[in-house]
Amino acid sequence: MNKFVKGLAMATALTASVSTFAKAEEPTKGGTLVTVLGTNVRNLNSAVQSGIVTGFPGAQLFASPLRYDDDWTPQPYLAESWEVSEDGLTVTLNLVKNAKFHDGTPLTSEDVAFSVEVIKANHPFKAMFAPVESVSTPDAHTAVLNLSKPHPALMLAMSGQLMSIIPKHIYGDGEISDVKTHARNNENVVGSGPFKLSEFKNGEHVILERFDDFFIDGRPYLDKIVMRIITDPAARAIAYENGELHMGAFESLPRIINRLKKVDGLTVTSDGYGAIGPIDWLAMNTTKGPLADVRVRKAIAYAVDKNFIHKALMQGTASDSTSGIHPDSPFYAAQEGYDLDLEKSAALLDEAGFPVKDGTRMSLTIDFGWPGVKPQVEYVKAALKKVNIDVEVRASADFPTWAKKMGMMDFDMSWDTVFNWGDPVIGVHRTYDSTNIAKGVWSNTQGYSNARVDELMGMAAVETDPAKRKELYGEFQQIIADELPVYHTNTLPYHTVYSDKVGNPPLGIWGTSTPIDMTYIKE
């Protein structure tokens, strides 16, 4: 039995009662949790829609095979146990026998097989289930995922943010490709999660009520969750301060975070975002002009002061990031950074054949897609001026306009935020894979190509020994840090805010994109 399988076998011995949340006293049952979503919700069905704003309600409405604790260990959920074959080509899920959908219909292995088919056809993260060729259903409570190759990323892909089990008897009424726009995605939603939909008014709220026939006895603890939709960060801050909100997550504005840290009765923490894995970086188009020369990319890195970004722009709320893998990931390997050195920057530019002429060496553009990163973009412009690089800042009219530019590689530099989404196969490979160049926003929009990097990612994708995977990703990160298709600056400072009234807030690796059946309101 290989180490990967041994680790899973150990995990299956644990019971579903193991908490993925902070430890707390004896929970109180009942009550209403008032929380918040920072943007409007396009789709409540997380089987066909990615993103954190779908992940929060989606993980409450729909159950998944696994859940995760705060040290990245898989725990039973819909699957009370599971086995991985010695060759890594089959994953057998042994489902709980008492799971029901909100309309009373029993959940079976047929729903698991159907859900995998829907996710493969509709979800934007194609790498998650690409090796899954079929799902066998030998009986109502056994689902066997048959793989074309070992796929260790599958374990994280089977958690709530990424693998909602949806009812075949509702969504199977048409073509698989139609599920993304199915009428039941946002109204009369039926899942098997701890809460069922009471009301959804986009722009206002999502209201969930306790599902009394949830398959884990005694849960959820809450009677109701009210998710207010408040898109203005300042308005959310006031609501936290006034006690109108019990809890919220994914707050990322440094001034708001630091403001709320000063409020009595509130806890503001960055714990719980490791699997989301949000990191900021300066993307560089490696296919044209001066940026095709790695010496120019390194010169830019030496001219951009990360210390200024961390202290002045992020106001101490973000962590350092030195590679394409989030620092909280078990596969992260810190790399030697590019400390501010204007002399070294200038020397590299001279060496690359870009001497100062008439006060400048070259002209570049830098794009950004949302207002919140304008300070970073303006700082890069000022920083590069010190080494005689002229930068034109290009603000897009809206996010889709910026996304189109990125997808078409119509840029020199751009400030971007990208998520790891649990396993590097899901959210990291897409940025550096030479077969994924210019396949839309958040693909390999840098045009980066390195045969060894492709080889390392290919080996890591099928390596079932965690130690060997970590070693492969260590070399991968070294190459990325040296060749700099992107300059990694910091984590996006996502924070969870909760009042003293909240017991057991969700602080596991998925944040609120996980079932909160163990969260409660204190008496």
Image: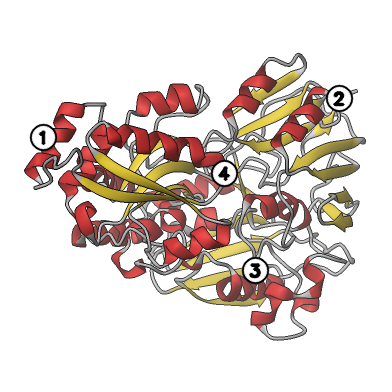
Does residue 477 appear left or right of residue 33 in this picture? left
- Which residue is denoted by mark 1 in the rendering? 347
Residue for point 45% across, 29% down:
319
- Which residue is denoted by mark 3 in the rendering? 142
Residue for point 20% across, 62% down:
451
Residue for point 36% across, 40% down:
488
The tag on residue 522 is 2
Q: Residue 208 versus residue 389: which sits nearer the camera?
A: 389
Instruction: Check if mark 1's residue and mark 3's residue have beta carbons within 8 Å.
Output: no
Give SS at disc 2. Answer: loop
Q: Earlier in the sequence, mark 1 or mark 4?
A: 1
Q: Position of residue 56 (x, y in %)?
A: 71, 49
Q: Earlier in the sequence, mark 3 or mark 4?
A: 3
Q: Position of residue 18 (x, y in %)?
A: 66, 38
Q: Looking at the rendering, in which quadrant would you find the N terminus? A: bottom left
- Which residue is denoted by mark 4 in the rendering? 371
At label 1, counting other C-alpha atoms closer than 10 Å, the crowd grade (few under 14, some 14-19, many 20 or more) is some
- Quadrant in which residue 15 is drawn: top right
Q: Does residue 181 show up?
A: yes
**Spatial distance from mark 1 to mark 3, Cα to Cα?**
63 Å
**Spatial distance from mark 1 to mark 4, Cα to Cα?**
34 Å
Instruction: Check if mark 1's residue and mark 2's residue have beta carbons within 8 Å.
Output: no
Q: Earlier in the sequence, mark 4 or mark 2?
A: 4
Which mark is in front, 4 or 2?
Answer: 4
At label 4, counting other C-alpha atoms closer than 10 Å, the crowd grade (few under 14, some 14-19, many 20 or more) is few
Q: Residue 452 versus residue 402: which sits nearer the camera?
A: 402
Which mark is in front, 2 or 3?
Answer: 2
Q: Position of residue 54 (x, y in %)?
A: 69, 55
Extreme residue in the front direction: 358
